[in-house]
Amino acid sequence: MDQVDWKPIRSAQYPLHQQIYEYLKQKILNGEWTVGVKIPPLRILAEQLNVNRSTVVAALEELAADGFIDSRVGYGTFVANNTWSTISSGAAPDWKTYVDSGVHKSNQSIIQEINRSEFRADMIRLGTGELAPEFLPRKKMKGIFQQKTAQELSLSYTEPKGSYSLRAAICDYLKRKGIEASPSSVLIVSGGLQALQLISLGLLQKGSVVFHESPSYVTSVNVFQSAGMNLLGVPMGDKGMKTELLPKLRRQHHASLLYTIPTFHNPTGHTMPVLKREELLQTCSHERLPILEDDVYGDLWFEEPPPQPLKANDRQGLVLYMGSISKTLGPGLRIGWLVGPEQVIDRLADIKMQTDYGSSTLSQYAVAQWLQSGLYDEHIFHLREKLKFRRDTAIRILEKYYSGIATWNNPAGGFYIWLKLYEAVSMDKLFKRALKAGILINPGNIYDYKDSSHIRISYSYAEPAQLEKGLKRLAEIIGEMSRR
Amino acid sequence: MDQVDWKPIRSAQYPLHQQIYEYLKQKILNGEWTVGVKIPPLRILAEQLNVNRSTVVAALEELAADGFIDSRVGYGTFVANNTWSTISSGAAPDWKTYVDSGVHKSNQSIIQEINRSEFRADMIRLGTGELAPEFLPRKKMKGIFQQKTAQELSLSYTEPKGSYSLRAAICDYLKRKGIEASPSSVLIVSGGLQALQLISLGLLQKGSVVFHESPSYVTSVNVFQSAGMNLLGVPMGDKGMKTELLPKLRRQHHASLLYTIPTFHNPTGHTMPVLKREELLQTCSHERLPILEDDVYGDLWFEEPPPQPLKANDRQGLVLYMGSISKTLGPGLRIGWLVGPEQVIDRLADIKMQTDYGSSTLSQYAVAQWLQSGLYDEHIFHLREKLKFRRDTAIRILEKYYSGIATWNNPAGGFYIWLKLYEAVSMDKLFKRALKAGILINPGNIYDYKDSSHIRISYSYAEPAQLEKGLKRLAEIIGEMSRR
């Protein structure tokens, strides 16, 4: 049962518990809750239905009297019977075994909790790596479908690599970053995460190792591990990744790829200096170790543009380059791109066709329009201003409440401040206590499981007043936890 | 290199071969064609660049003289050097090994060829399982973003199960098919193929077996095999699947799921009668074998509505039900839905979040609008008429040219006629000969590898005149092949 589902109507002529009884009974009779399934605990049901626990109890007692549910002491309440079944001889499949035995890993439970809680209206979201809805051009997006244009809106399947107009528009856009690519070397993907998935399924062997900065966004998703690869964080020095360790690490591990976010890194907000970029390219070239460059934040600089992407100085086809409009125009569009050697793009396009037959043509059309018309540049220009203001606000709030308990960086772009607490705390406890106080955070151990002193603060989502309220309360919680 | 990429300009002041030389050199210098990669054969290059072979040869000779490419007798021509590389010490990664060693299977080569050839403008497409562009409401689709509506367009990430408005609209729509479901039991997916992928990753064990009708669409995709499952075709009788064999087959194999397309089956066009549906439900219920019901063609009936979906008579949560607007509003939207027990939907929603963070909100918004406004029903009403006319046309053409060489069914809806040749032929040869004649067909061995006498004819794509021209020529080719 998710957050926004049915709720009983208080003004209705039927009592609340009667409405709830009917609702739950229908779920059982329709096979949405199958026989043997455990129903949510009383507390959760009452919360989600927005009624007193006693009301839920009344409904459950009636269901039990009818034989639909049954409770086992210490285990909870289960669906016991589906007496009105049209097929009396059988029972439901053992779905629990199915759910437990699938190949793909579940999200970490903390990530699942974040995914769910992000849709609770009452939450102050300090961790959300996403632009606030007010930054997203929703009205202009509708208008884009009204513009006169040479580009036709297709509702058919696109070519395996994606819409040609969009790929051509992306090549023009990339040229300004110093990247030379032709449309045949570009694959349209449904966001950066899908690019990672296609690479994991299409290019890597089971058991091989993906290097990454430590901490890194990539450890918060299971995309490589679910496909049978392992992740290994490369130690970091003052200037970023210790590239001098790569040859040795490569000999020790069956490394197949190095994943990096050189610009406005997630979660640290750090940007790799030019010299480090050159060093990394040279080392990986020497090791013949491909680089996957994640550049989804590159357009969001504040004072000055960041150094050129690694891909701009790659003449060998060493770098696979990922970009996206998820962090600029809106993640809901689900449009990103992957640029690399043609044979690699061909292979990944074939897998993409087998995965989802291509990305939405509405989204592809819209993004091509934004890029071609110049509206994208205009949007980004204003977005940078607004986001810079948010960053300044966040830094000011941190100075006010955190100078005694933490240090932090001042990011030159992107979404993130990497807050380092002076005292280590239990990340799981901190997450739960904050959640209880209505504050959603991304604790550091999502990005490095050993971490116990960082929090990723995102200034892209919560409004300034909320940001202050949330950060203030969070500082109090941290204070309380340290004092114990 | 794909079909629509760069072509030399005939009116330019530079000779064609010079333009081609520059174009190919840039591809090499930019690392799109990496050192060691085999370049496309002369014939293909000349075809794609739309020039004489001798022009391509002139360009290649110049590249060879500069040391960029090199040919090995009997093997082809390879990129030899990238002398202007900024990083002189290293070489490109061995991408070929990467491409060859990925976990995911490639598409069957015949499917890859179909995917590519579908974008050649000169092809008569007799096999394409897709509505012709003129059937798709492209203009109205743009208009849908202008309608006044209570529904907000979101550009943010959606909830794990997809937009609530869309799920609620789908529940209303399904009610008319006799399916009772609440939004929490519905998952929005990026088309039916993604539903299969999520199920294969989220619910099934490696080595388990998926039963299906034989022939079946599902054998034309690698989605289950790439995740480590096996497919097994259940023998068919006059009235469809021989359900009486299921208990024994289940004992012999580690069967975890039965996949079926009961209505307007792909590729046979067959519709499962009511009695067979009941029998199948009872048998699977008894065996506790879950059913995956693929109902993407159900709205496209001609004379009378088909029997209710299996899901409408499932009170136990035995059936996972798939639907989509790909065959009605347009595959480019990439919107489908999966309905099933809540715990299953919860699990698959979590994997969906790990795969692509949800489907396009533009597409979700548009489909919800179509369904809620009644425009969908109106569109389907007219679409049925037009599609029925196409079916009648196809049958008339078959009667004219095929009565001596094949038999066929008269489908009551959907897209497909399953042409059965009196004489077996080599499917691969037939496919290639037709392709050479500019006709793209889907040979029967895609749907059952042992098949050598069926062709899937789709009347949904080619215009009547093209359909006649293509079918006539195909009959001649079949005739020529049989006479040998």
Image: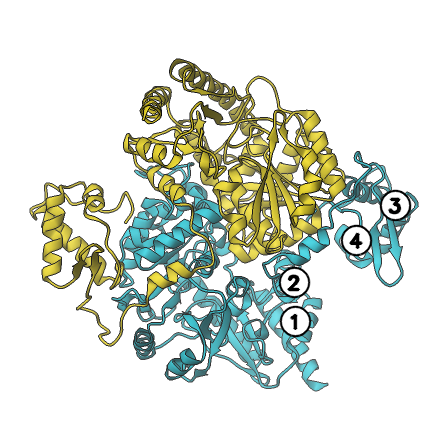
Chain colours: A cyan, B yellow
Q: Chain of mark 2?
A: A
For marks 1 and 2, give the CA distance. 10 Å
Q: For the residue marked with disc 1, what is the amino acid? A: Phe
Q: Which of the marked residues, 1 or 2, is nearer the chain's N terminus?
A: 2
| Residue indicated by mark 1 | A431
Looking at the image, is mark 1 or mark 4 nearer the viewer? Answer: 4
Circle 3/circle 2 CB separation < 8 Å? no
Specify the label residue A39 is tagged with.
4
Can the viewer see residue B6?
yes
Residue B422, given in percent of the width and then of the height, sits at 44, 22
Instruction: Give whichever of A273, B119 is nearer the camera.
Output: B119
Residue B104, given in percent of the width and then of the height, sits at 47, 55
Q: For the residue marked with disc 2, what is the amino acid? A: Glu
Q: Residues within 10 Å of mark 4 (few under 14, many from 20)?
A: some
Specify the label residue A63 is tagged with.
3
Q: Residue at x 81, y 52 (%)?
A: A51
Instruction: Give whichever of A399, A173 is nearer the camera.
Output: A173
Whether residue B278 sits left or right of residue B188 in the image: it is right
Looking at the image, is mark 2 or mark 4 nearer the viewer? Answer: 4
Q: Which of the marked residues, 3 or 2, is nearer the chain's N terminus?
A: 3
Q: Which of the marked residues, 2 or 4, is nearer the chain's N terminus?
A: 4
Circle 1/circle 3 CB separation < 8 Å? no
Q: Chain of mark 1?
A: A
Residue A295, image quadrant:
bottom left
Circle 3/circle 4 CB separation < 8 Å? no
Q: Secondary structure at mark 4?
A: loop
Q: For the residue marked with disc 4, what is the amino acid? A: Ile
| Residue indicated by mark 2 | A113
Looking at the image, is mark 1 or mark 2 nearer the viewer? Answer: 2
Residue B79, image quadrant:
bottom left
